[in-house]
């Protein structure tokens, strides 16, 4: 008889606190978040700039079909979404590296709704499967104890619904 072994999940929980311009990664031990501390900080300076300081000029003008009226060629995504997409790619690279090094088994994501939506779309399945909670708040400037308490609340709410 053969038994299939399930791969053991590391006991470390990573907590990602991010917005379009800044990300902080915290680590703690499951389930009480013992030894909770910041392990990495990332920045995306372009996100803090005003769009006019980054984009060179206005949208182009184009002629319609068969000599129709001209129209503006607006960008497909606005500045906030574009910078969120760029930064989320950088964060995903960091999370993939941590996952490949087996540094965490569970992930909690705290981000404002706009960034959370963009970030969620960019997550590859192995990382998305490790997400145990999402909190739609702006907390990049909060201290570690405040972040830890929000994560503990989310974990206890998650456990009470199971």
Image (spheres, rainbow, N blue to C red):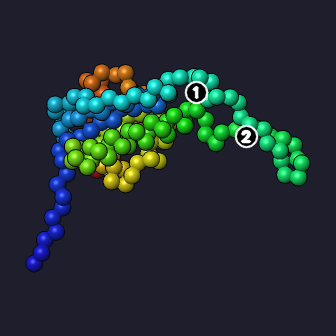
Q: Nearer the viewer, residue 103 or 133?
A: 103
Quadrant, the N terminus:
bottom left
Query: Would residue 149 appear left or right of 86 to someone viewing this image?
Result: left
Q: Is disc 1 surrounded by few (<14), some (14 to 19) or many (20+) residues within 10 Å? A: few
Mark 2: secondary structure: strand
Query: Would residue 138 appear left or right of 69 to someone viewing this image?
Result: left
Mark 1: secondary structure: helix
Q: Position of residue 109 (x, y in %)?
A: 36, 38
Q: Which residue is mark 2?
A: 73
Q: Residue at x 24, y 31 (%)?
A: 39
Query: Would residue 59 appear left or right of 138 to someone viewing this image?
Result: right
Q: Position of residue 144 (x, y in %)?
A: 27, 24
Q: Check the image and report above or below for 58 versus 100.
A: above
Disc number for residue 54: 1
Sequence order check: which comes first, mark 2 or mark 1? 1
Query: Would residue 62 appear left or right of 6 to someone viewing this image?
Result: right
Q: Check the image and report above or below for 63 versus 45.
A: below
Disc number for residue 117: none
């Amino acid at each position: 008889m053969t038994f299939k072994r399930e791969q053991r999940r590391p006991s470390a929980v990573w907590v990602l606190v991010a917005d379009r311009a800044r990300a902080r990664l915290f680590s703690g031990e499951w389930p009480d978040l013992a030894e909770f501390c910041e392990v990495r900080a990332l920045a995306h300076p372009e996100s803090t700039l005003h769009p006019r300081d980054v984009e060179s000029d206005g949208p182009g003008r184009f002629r319609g079909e068969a000599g129709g009226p001209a129209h503006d060629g607006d960008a497909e995504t606005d500045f906030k979404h574009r910078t969120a997409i760029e930064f989320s790619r950088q964060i995903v690279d960091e999370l993939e590296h941590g996952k490949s090094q087996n540094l965490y088994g569970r992930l909690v994501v705290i981000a404002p709704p706009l960034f959370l939506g963009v970030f969620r779309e960019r997550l590859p399945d192995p990382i998305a499967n490790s997400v145990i909670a999402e909190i739609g708040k702006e907390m990049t400037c909060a201290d570690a104890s405040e972040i830890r308490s929000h994560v503990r609340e989310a974990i206890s709410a998650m456990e009470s619904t199971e």
